[in-house]
Amino acid sequence: MQKIIRQIAAELRVQDRQVLAAVELLDGGATVPFVARYRKEATGGLDDIQLRELEARLGYLRDLEDRREAVLKSVDEQGKLTPELRAAIEAAPTKQELEDLYLPFKPKRRTKGQVAREAGMEPLADALFANPLLVPADEAAAYVKAARGENGEDFTTVAAVLDGVRDILSERWAEDASLVQSLREWLWADGLLRSRLAAGKDANLPDNAKFRDYFEYEEPIGRVPSHRALAVFRGRALEVLEARLALPVDPEPGQPSIAEGRIALHVGWSHQKRPADDLLRKCVAWAWKVKLSLSTERDLFTRLREDAEKVAIKVFADNLRDLLLAAPAGPRVVMGLDPGIRTGVKVAVVDATGKLVETATIYPHEPRRDWDGSLHTLALLCRKHGVNLIAIGNGTASRETDKLAADLMKRVDGLTRVVVSEAGASVYSASEYASQEMPDVDVSLRGAASIARRLQDPLAELVKIDPKSIGVGQYQHDVNQGDLARALDAVVEDCVNSVGVDLNTASVPLLARVSGLSPSVARAVVRWRESHGAFRSRQQLLDVGGLGPKTFEQSAGFLRIRGGENPLDMTGVHPETYPVVEKILAQVGRPVTELMGRAEMLRTLKPELFANEKFGVITVKDILGELEKPGRDPRPDFQVARFNDGVEDIADLQPGMVLEGTVSNVAAFGAFVDVGVHQDGLVHVSQLAHKFVNDAREVVKAGAIVKVKVLEVDAARKRISLTMKLGDAPVRGGESRNRFEGAGRGQRAPASQPLPTAMAGAFAKLRK
C-alpha cells in the first residue's frame, strides 16, 4: 500500500501524508465533497479535483496490484518464475505492460509453435537462428517424422519441419515483451490511422454520407483528436468505414516493411545471403504479418479509443457542470412551453416555489393555426398568476413557439422569454418520480413543468434526470457507459454539495445527491418532514430513521435550514465546528446574528486565536468565510441574452452582424452559440480569441452569454460560422499568424479557405 501512496503522491505532486490521510478517509466511508470541504487539515487542503483523481488512481493501482499478485502466482506455479522475471513483473507500471510480461506464460489454446516444440523442433530452430550458415533443408532432414502424430500434427516432410521452425521463432518474438512494447510505442508515435469507405457501400446514402470526411482519411494515430477517433470507430461499427493501422511508409511490393526491419534489428539478425537467411526473413515477416500486426493494431485502437473516450467524457462532464451550476432565475413565477405542432404546445405555470399551479394545451400551429386563441389563453394565465418569465423548450416547433411568445410580450408587460434545453424532459416526464410528484398531470404536461423549473433552479430540476439524458456531450453513446456514468455522477455530487441544499424544500432526487445520503435515507428525510413539519435544526436529522451519526457527519454541513433555531444552520459551517464559532462569539462579545455578514469585523479576527488540535487555522478561515457570506450561492447571477430585433430565422443573418447569444455546448473544437434563430452557430476554437486556444473551455462555458459576429451563413445546410474576435488583434513585432483548419487531417488551411465554414461543415453532423 505504501508503494501506491508514494506513486499517487508523485503524480499529484503532493506529500505522502496528504495522500495517506485522504485514502484513510475515503476507505472509512467519507465522500469526496466532505473530505474536500471539512477535512482540509487532514489532507493538507486537497481539493475536489485532486481527490477525484486520487480516487480514480487508487482504484486502478489497487486493481493492478491484485492482478500482479495473480500473475506472480500463476507463473510461479508453472515453475518459471525467475528472479529477473519477478523483478520485471513487480516493476510493471501499467496493466498493459504487466500483460505483456505474462503473455508467454498465459494459459491458452495450443498454438502451432507449441505443437512444433512438443514435436522436438525447438533445437533446430535455435540452431538455425544461432548459425545461419547452416543449410535449413539439410538440418531439417534429421527432424522429419515417419508418420503423423497422435493429435494429427504432420512433420513428415522437410517443408513441414521448416514451417515448424517458422512458427516457433515467430511466436517467441511475438511474445517478447520488450519488442512488443517498442513496436507499440513506435507506431503510436509514427503510425497512421487510415479509413476508407467500406467496399460495396454507397457514398451517397444519407446514413453513409455523414462519414464523408473519413472516406479517404489518414492521420498520425497518436495525434488523432477525440471527436475524429470516435467518428471513425462509429463508422466502422456501422460497417460504413474500413479502418486500419498503417505503417508510416508503405513497403514496396516484395520488399520487407519498416516493421519487419525493426523486428530484425531487435532480435539481432540481418540478411547476409547465408543459407538460412531466407528462412529467417520468412520468420521475421511471419512474426509481423501473422502475429504482431493485428495484435498491435488492436492494442493501439484500444488505446486510441480509451484516450478519445476520456476526452469525450471530460467534455460531457465539464459541460454538465456548467449547466448544473448555471445561474438560477430564483423564486419567480415561470410559464413553461413545451413546443409541438400537431399535438399542440403544452403549457405549465409554476409558482415561485416551483409548485405546479395550472396547465393548458394550445394549438397555434398546424393544423388548427389558432394563433389568436393561443395568445388569449397565455395572456390570461400570465395575468392570473403573475408570470414574469417564459421558458420555451428548444425542440420541434421551438422557433414558431418563440414567435408566439414574442407576440405575447407585446400584449403583457414585464415578460422575458428564454429558450431552454429540453433534453431529458421526456425522460423525466415518464419517470416514477414525476408520477409521484405530479400524479394527476398528463405525462405530456409534466415536461412543460420541468422546462419551467429548469429556469428557476437548473440544479434542483436536472438532478431528477439521468445525467446521460441531458445530452451535452459528443459521441456520448459511443463511450464506455460505466465510466461515463461514474464521471457524471461525480459531477452531480460535487455540484449539489458545492451549492448546498435547502433541507425543508429539497426533493428526494436532490437530497440523494447530498454527501452521505443514499436514496433510501433521502426518502426517509422527506417522510419525516411530511410527518413532523419543517426541520427546525440540523440536530433533528438524527431523529430520522436510518440516519445515524456517520451519515449526519457526512451530510449535515451541506444541508441548509432557513429561519431555523440556530442561524448557523443556514450556512456551510459544519455542526461539529459550532464550538469554534462560540469561541469566536465570546471573543467579540456579540451574538451570531450580529456577526454574520459583517465582513469588516470578521476580517479583523486572527484565525490562530481560535484554532485547536482538532480544527486548525484552515478550518477557522473557512468558518470566518462562511460567516462573512452566510448561505452564499457560488452560481452566477441570472442573465438573459438579448436577441436582436428582427433576427428570428437563419435567413435573417448577414455576415458582419454582431449578436448576443448563449453558449449551448462546448466541444474540443469550439463552442456552439444560440443567437435566437433556432440553429446554433459554431465558433471554431481558432475564432474564440486573438490568442492560441488549446481548449475551448479556457474561454467559454456552457450557459455563458457572449457577443459574436457572423462570418458566414449557409442557410441551405443550416450552418452558421461565428467569431468572438470582435476587435483587431494586438500586433506583435515580427509575429506571423498561421491558421489551422483541423477538420480534415490536421493540415494547415490555405489562406483563401474560409476557416469557420470549413469547421461548421465538418462538425455539424458530429454534434447530432
Image (spheres, rainbow, N blue to C red):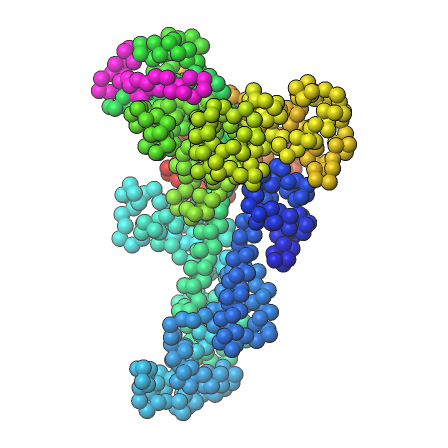
Quarter the N terminus occupies: bottom right
Whole-percent x, y for residue 125 in the image: 46, 83
Whole-percent x, y for residue 635 in the image: 55, 27
Residue in view at x 63 percent, y 54 percent: 5
Q: Nearer the viewer, residue 500 or 269?
A: 500
Q: Nearer the viewer, residue 654 or 227?
A: 227
Residue extending furthest toward the left = 367
362 is within the stretch colored magenta: yes
Position of residue 585 in the picture relative to residue 239 (left or right): right
Position of residue 447 in the picture relative to residue 284 (left or right): left
Q: Nearer the viewer, residue 344 or 251?
A: 344
Whole-percent x, y for residue 505 in the image: 47, 25
Quarter the C terminus occupies: top left
Looking at the rendered structure, the number of numbered marks drawn on it comes to 0
Position of residue 49 in the picture relative to residue 156 (left or right): right
Is residue 24 at all visible to an observer of this figure?
A: yes
Residue in view at x 68 percent, y 31 percent: 579
Is residue 640 at all visible to an observer of this figure?
A: no
Residue in view at x 41 percent, y 42 percent: 476
Vertical comparison of 7 with 338: above or below: below
Position of residue 199 in the picture relative to residue 106 (left or right): left
Vertical comparison of 122 with 180: above or below: below
State which quadrant residue 138 falls in. Answer: bottom left
145 is within the stretch colored magenta: no
Q: Which residues are magenta?
A: 345-374
Whole-percent x, y for residue 567 in the image: 61, 23
Residue in view at x 34 percent, y 9 percent: 380
